[in-house]
Image (cartoon, rainbow, N blue to C red):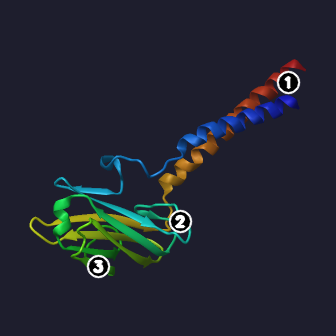
Amino acid sequence: MKKIKKIWMTGVLLFTFFYSGFVAAHGNVPLENDVCVRMMAGSMVHLSTYQPQYDPQAEYCTEIPHEGETFWVLDIIDHALRTMPIDIRIVRGSGDSTGDTVASMYSTEHTDGVIKGAFNLDKGDYTLLVTGVGIPSFHYEYPLSIQTTNYTNLFISVIPYILAFLLIAFLTDKFLKRRQMLH
């Protein structure tokens, strides 16, 4: 019985060790590698979204976990873009700028490089369109998924459980076979 407990404890410890490697945060990522940054001809913009009513510390980009009020901040990194009027629209659907406009904003005052606002979206897929009105103009798109299931992330999150189960099953099988041979 003690050996079974040792096997289970080893399995739990291995699971805990391997699972902690899957934890990732959005912060401290170089801009070039940040999934919330869009580039066009050397110009960059960065989108951050927040839902403080659910998690005051969490920052999201394009996958927003809950429907409802969401605060967003668009950082205009390139100084040349800060003097340009910027049109921001949220359309229903993914990637189609001709979809139903759900929310819109036109900003001419953003010399500090920050445009912020809030939107209240239902569950589903949307696209945030950022268009600079000037010469040359620019156009960025952010797909937004509100409270939808990302099957890739779901699969990645269950891999440690599957591996732990398989490891425990393998060790238990080896232990039981060895025990049968001894008796």
Q: Which numbered circle lies on residue 152?
A: none
Q: Residue at the spot x=30%, y=77% of the render?
A: 99
Q: State the residue position of label 1.
A: 180
Q: State the residue position of label 3.
A: 105
Q: Residue at the spot x=9%, y=67% of the render?
A: 135
Around disc 3, counting alpha carbons within 10 Å, would you say few (fewer than 14), some (14 to 19), or many (20 or more)?
few
Residue depth check, mark 1 versus mark 3: number of the one nearer the observer: 3
The first of marks 3 and 2 along the sequence is 2
Amino acid type, callout 1: Gln
Calculate the distance from the C-alpha at mark 1 to the C-alpha at mark 3.
73 Å
- Quadrant hosting residue 15: top right
* CB under 8 Å between discs 1 and 3: no
Q: Secondary structure at mark 3?
A: strand
- Quadrant hosting residue 163: top right
Q: Residue at the spot x=90%, y=20% of the render?
A: 183
Q: Secondary structure at mark 2?
A: loop
> On the rendered image, what quadrant is the N terminus found in?
top right
Q: State the residue position of label 2.
A: 56
> Where does residue 95 sit, x and y in percent of width and height?
30, 67
- 151 sits to left or right of 127: right
* CB under 8 Å between discs 2 and 1: no
Residue depth check, mark 2 versus mark 1: number of the one nearer the observer: 2
The first of marks 2 and 1 along the sequence is 2
Q: Residue at the spot x=68%, y=41% of the render?
A: 165
- 148 sits to left or right of 85: right
The first of marks 1 and 3 along the sequence is 3
Give the residue furthest to the left.
Answer: 135
Amino acid type, callout 3: Met
* CB under 8 Å between discs 3 and 2: no
Calculate the distance from the C-alpha at mark 3 to the C-alpha at mark 2.
25 Å
